[in-house]
Image (spheres, coloured by chain):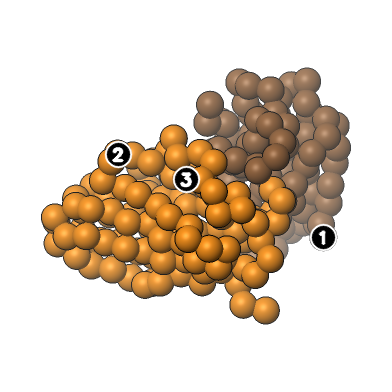
Chain colours: A brown, B orange
């Protein structure tokens, strides 16, 4: 049931782009994206609720393909502050949003 | 506005001892989640409550773990007796009606 994230790790130069994928073997109700910096708690980025929905927030956006049961997170023109581990959390039904988190993708942005 | 508050921030104890972790959710939030994070197992949901009622405790590893939410502003996660394999960071998170979850700073537990 745990979603599969890919890649496991990414190294970027400042200004480069990256895509992080999250796939589920089970039909999804929603996908949540979080970022966690070392030694800190996960911080919410965005929720995607409908198939094909794309949301954005600054230079970070995401899409949700309900048919393919997957979501992708797009980081454009990366900044040093984007470094951290990105987790997708998947919910299989509405209501209380019980999330199952993927293993995470470690992103390091260098000058 | 205060976020989710957890205490203690660090706990070091010996195997066999009882450990109690505490959480105060954001005022007005009606859902509360307890997670455990380790390098090996990642971020695992242990139990969650809605309106103070436990909804799903299928993630609680064994009977040594128990959680309570006596009122809307307080929850505890208890491990009795503790074992070295319980060493992890335990996060509490709260949300309003299943929307974004706000995580507390976590409790780093070390069981010797």
User: Measured from the top left, where is residue A33 in percent x and y?
Assistant: 67, 47
Q: Residue at x 65, y 42 (%)?
A: A97
The location of residue A32, given as percent across then percent down, is 68, 45
Same subunit: marks 1 and 2: no
The answer to whether residue B82 is seen in the rendering is: yes
State the residue at coordinates (16%, 60%).
Answer: B17
> Circle 1 marks a residue in which chain?
A
Circle 3 crowding by C-alpha within 10 Å: few under 14, some 14–19, many from 20 = many
Which is more N-terminal, label 2 or label 3?
3
Determine contact: label 3, label 2, CB under 8 Å.
no
Q: Secondary structure at mark 2?
A: loop
Q: Is residue A74 left or right of residue A53?
A: left
Query: Between residues A109 and A54, which one lies in front from this camera angle?
Result: A54
Q: Secondary structure at mark 1?
A: loop
Q: CA distance from mark 1 to mark 2?
A: 43 Å
Q: Nearer the viewer, mark 1 or mark 2?
A: 2
**Where the C terminus of chain A falls, by quadrant?**
bottom right
Which residue is at a point 63% across and 21% down the rendered structure image? A26
- Residue B47 disc label: 3
Residue under pointer 2 = B62
Measured Cα–Cα span from mark 3 to mark 1? 33 Å
> Callout 2: 10 Å neighbours few (<14), some, many (20+)?
few
Which-is-in-front pick, marks 3 and 1?
3
């Amino acid at each position: 049931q745990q979603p599969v994230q890919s890649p496991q790790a990414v190294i970027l130069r400042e200004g480069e782009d990256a895509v992080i994928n999250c796939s589920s073997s089970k039909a999804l109700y929603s996908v949540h994206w979080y970022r966690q910096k070392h030694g800190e708690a996960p911080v919410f980025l965005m929720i995607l609720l409908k198939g094909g929905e794309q949301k954005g927030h600054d230079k970070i956006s995401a899409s949700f393909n309900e048919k393919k049961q997957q979501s992708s997170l797009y980081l454009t023109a990366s900044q040093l502050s984007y470094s951290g581990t990105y987790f997708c959390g998947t919910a299989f039904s509405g209501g209380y949003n019980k999330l199952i988190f993927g293993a995470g993708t470690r992103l390091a942005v260098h000058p | 506005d205060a976020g989710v508050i957890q205490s203690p921030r660090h706990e070091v104890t010996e195997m066999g001892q009882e450990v109690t972790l505490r959480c105060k959710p954001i005022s007005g939030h009606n859902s509360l989640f307890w997670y455990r994070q380790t390098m090996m197992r990642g971020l695992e949901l242990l139990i969650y409550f809605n309106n103070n009622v436990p909804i799903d405790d299928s993630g609680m590893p064994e009977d040594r773990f128990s959680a309570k939410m006596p009122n809307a502003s307080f929850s505890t996660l208890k491990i009795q007796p503790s074992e070295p394999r319980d060493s992890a960071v335990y996060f509490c998170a709260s949300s309003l009606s299943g929307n974004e979850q706000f995580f507390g700073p976590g409790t780093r537990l070390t069981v010797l």
